[in-house]
Image: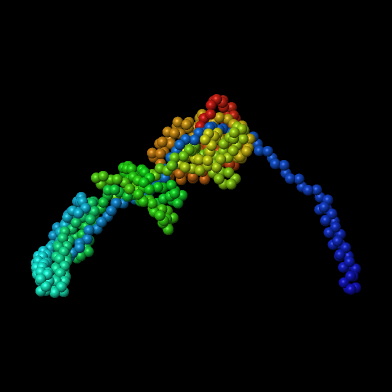
Amino acid sequence: MRKIFNSSTLVFVLIVGFLAFWIGGGMMNREPVAAPEPQPLPIVTVAASFSEAVDVTPVVSLYGDVVPNQIALLRSRVSGTVENVDSQGSEVSQGDVLGRISADAREASVARAEAQLRSAERDYEAARQLAQRGVGSDAEQQSRFAQLEAARADLRAAELELANTDLRAPITGTISRVMAEAGSFISAGTEVLEIVDNDPLVARVEVRQSEISHIRLGMPADVEFQGGTEREGRVSFISPIATAQTRTFRVEVEIDNPGREIPAGLSAQIGLSLNSERAHMVSPALVRLDDQGRIGLMAIDDSGEHLQFYPIEIVRARAEAIWVTGLPERVQLVTISQGALSSGQRVVVEETPESYRGVLGGWDGQSARDAAAEMAQSADSEALGAAQAAMGNQSALIDSIPAGDGPGDDQPDDAEADGAEADAADSLAAQPDPGRAGTGG
């Protein structure tokens, strides 16, 4: 006990206790740190224009191959020498005789079977009469009847063998290949001709998972073949299961081809029109991202003094414009801004200058409707990818406008690094009020 509670141990315990008391007393008497006061967002000047929704019909544009409606191989049913066969390129109808195999002894077989049938008929008739008189037995009559039926079957087989020497077209179409020429000996089952039916044609395309739910049997389709020929078709088949490798669904479009003018094997672009919906026509350069990574547009709220962010969904796209949903029927969209913008931020709203409306959108209601009709006739799915790429890159379109930062750029530029931008902003603020709302689409 003395060794444990010696003077050195007591001194150490006293020092530790003092330090603990000193540190604890300082923490208890310390005043809590005050939370920093939120800094108000600066009031900025933006240009904005009104946009009105119009009816637009989304079109799914797909690329596929065109195949014949049917391809049939005519095979010989009997062995023998090919006596004659139609030439390649001949138009044929179902049931037409396209060639002939040598009959050889088959005609003699038919004559023999006919003679045997006549003999069997006489024998059976004699046995039947004897049985009726009670002289012959029923067993003899039944035996003669069985011989009669066998003779009839032999005759039918001989006639069928002879008839099979005629090569008849299984379908209507065009002879595309001749595999057995006249004079060649073929066995039963040998391919002789290939017949292709190109009326109607069938276009096969692969539809993505996100679009297959909108496709219906009988849906009309616009088909443009390689070379510019256009036809109308209809959806005739939708695969009930996705392709394992691509996770897409095979869809077939049937295309009338009277006269078989269009050959099979061409590439084609197929446009499927979906249900129409209300959408706004805007410039891809106006699209921006919010803090959650959603694409959308910045607009002026009902008060006319604050910003509001609207998430959007693209339904149609072209290189110069996109059609989006998620906005009110009529909305005032921000077209030109300075620096980063936030939803709820207070702004001073100016009308979009006339000189910028053609670049940023500037379509009135009638122009938007005309563009919708034009897009419904000639949709290009590649433009959707271009528009999405423009959104991903936050579009350099507005960067070329000296009135301020582009709407897709959420990072403010250094004003001292570009004095011309500040001058352009002053010019924007000095624009006279036209007295009417333009279209920001």
Residue 308 drawn at (x, y percent): 59, 38
Residue 156 drawn at (x, y percent): 16, 64
Locate the N terminus and report the quarter of the image it occupies.
bottom right
Residue 408 drawn at (x, y percent): 55, 40
132 relative to 30, above or below: below
Please state which of residues 392 and 307 is positioned toward the viewer in this rendering.
Answer: 307
Write the residue at 27% across / 48% down: 199
Camera sees residue 89: no
Write the residue at 47% across / 42% down: 315
Please state which of residues 46 and 363 is positioned toward the viewer in this rendering.
Answer: 363
Looking at the image, residue 171 sits to the left or right of residue 119; the answer is right
Please state which of residues 267 and 376 is positioned toward the viewer in this rendering.
Answer: 376
Residue 268 drawn at (x, y percent): 34, 47
For the image, the number of numbered tags is 0
Camera sees residue 12: yes
136 relative to 43, above or below: below
250 relative to 183, above or below: above
Write the residue at 59% across / 35% down: 301
Looking at the image, residue 43 sits to the left or right of residue 165; the answer is right
Looking at the image, residue 145 sits to the left or right of residue 352; the answer is left
Looking at the image, residue 201 sits to the left or right of residue 426; the answer is left
Colouring scheme applied when the structure was drawn: rainbow
Write the residue at 32% across / 50% down: 202
